[in-house]
Image (cartoon, rainbow, N blue to C red):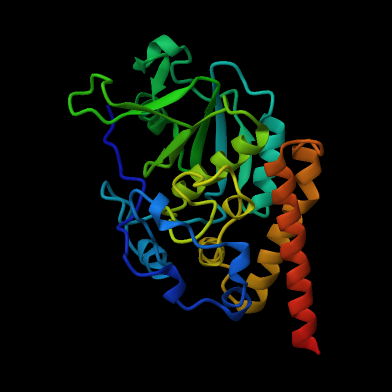
Amino acid sequence: SAKRKHTDAAISTASPNTQPLPPFLACVPSRFHPAVDQDLVIHPEEQTVADFVDMGQREPNEEGTGRWLYNEKRRRIRILTLGRASKSVSKLVTFLEAFFCGRFTFAVDNSAPRPPVTKKSYRTWNKAVEIWSILDELIPLVSKTDFGVLALTDWPLCEDYSDNGDGSDAIEVLGRACGDRVCVVSSSVPSIFELCCTTVHEILHLCGFDHTTSVQCLMNPSPYEPLLAGTVFLAPFNIWKLCILFNVVEPESAEEFVIKHYENLLDVWDVCFDSSGTTEESDARKWLVRRLKWKQGSSKKKSG
């Protein structure tokens, strides 16, 4: 099978908040992304902005110390379906396009060479498919014009941590990404809301983002509490990485990009999610409204 490349870069012990952020992000109140209770953190992880920038200056490799760079010739993320196609693909694409402000193009590709599409083709433990047996099949499908390939499957997924690969230490997971520009996400989640959050999280890993364990953020290894609003969106230092990824680093342009990011999400929220949906969906929408309202208020103070 293909060599596995570590998803995460070398992790710095420095707080990401010690890195210089542009003023419009540095002043965001902590109430939007409260600190995580460290008693809940099993493995502290943090990637500073400096770490992320440094990754962009290194070649991608098996140790995960480099990341793939975004450019106009490599901006497509192809979506392949394994098993039964998810009925939520169109809503998922709408959400992804809004989240990334149209910088990535998402194409559901039914014409690409297909990896094995039956559960029997992969290693299976306790009726869940071992995730690396899928990722290994996806790696050869990445083309030069792809930023990455995303596989969606309705199968439950697991990752086997046992030393001898016998499935004795297989843990169920919702998705996984690797440094070869491929990721897989299970659509067998309770809601389209959770599917969107999981998919963005894995795509951000493709972009070189590591986990965050200091504050509530979409890049938390897993929600420390059931999808609190702060865990659905990017903390300020991570949204600055998003600006860096897309080379939107001039302060005024970056601020416009971030505002557009939130406005886009609010515009498609009711299209993607049921207005009478879960408390988590409702709370996250209210978070968006408060975040934009706070931004409008802070802008008025500056202009005044």
In the rendered image, the residue lying farthest to the bottom is 304
Report x, y in % for residue 291: 71, 64
Is residue 155 rendered to the left or right of residue 40? right
Is residue 128 rendered to the left or right of residue 73? left
* x 80%, y 81%: residue: 300
Quadrant of the image containing the C terminus: bottom right
Residue 54 in the image: above or below residue 223:
below
Residue 304 in the image: above or below residue 54:
below
Report x, y in % for residue 123: 34, 17
On the question of residue 145 being in view, the answer is no
- Closer to the camera, 135 or 168? 168
In the rendered image, the residue lying farthest to the top is 120
Q: How many marks?
A: 0
Residue 225 in the image: above or below residue 293:
above
In the rendered image, the residue lying farthest to the front is 39
* x 46%, y 42%: residue: 144
Report x, y in % for residue 125: 35, 16
Quadrant of the image containing the N terminus: top left
In the rendered image, the residue lying farthest to the left is 164
Residue 134 in the image: above or below residue 60:
above
Q: Quadrant of residue 190?
A: top right
On the question of residue 95 being in view, the answer is yes
Report x, y in % for residue 109: 59, 28
Q: Quadrant of residue 162?
A: top left
Q: Quadrant of residue 239?
A: bottom right
* x 44%, y 75%: residue: 19
Is residue 231 rendered to the left or right of residue 132? right
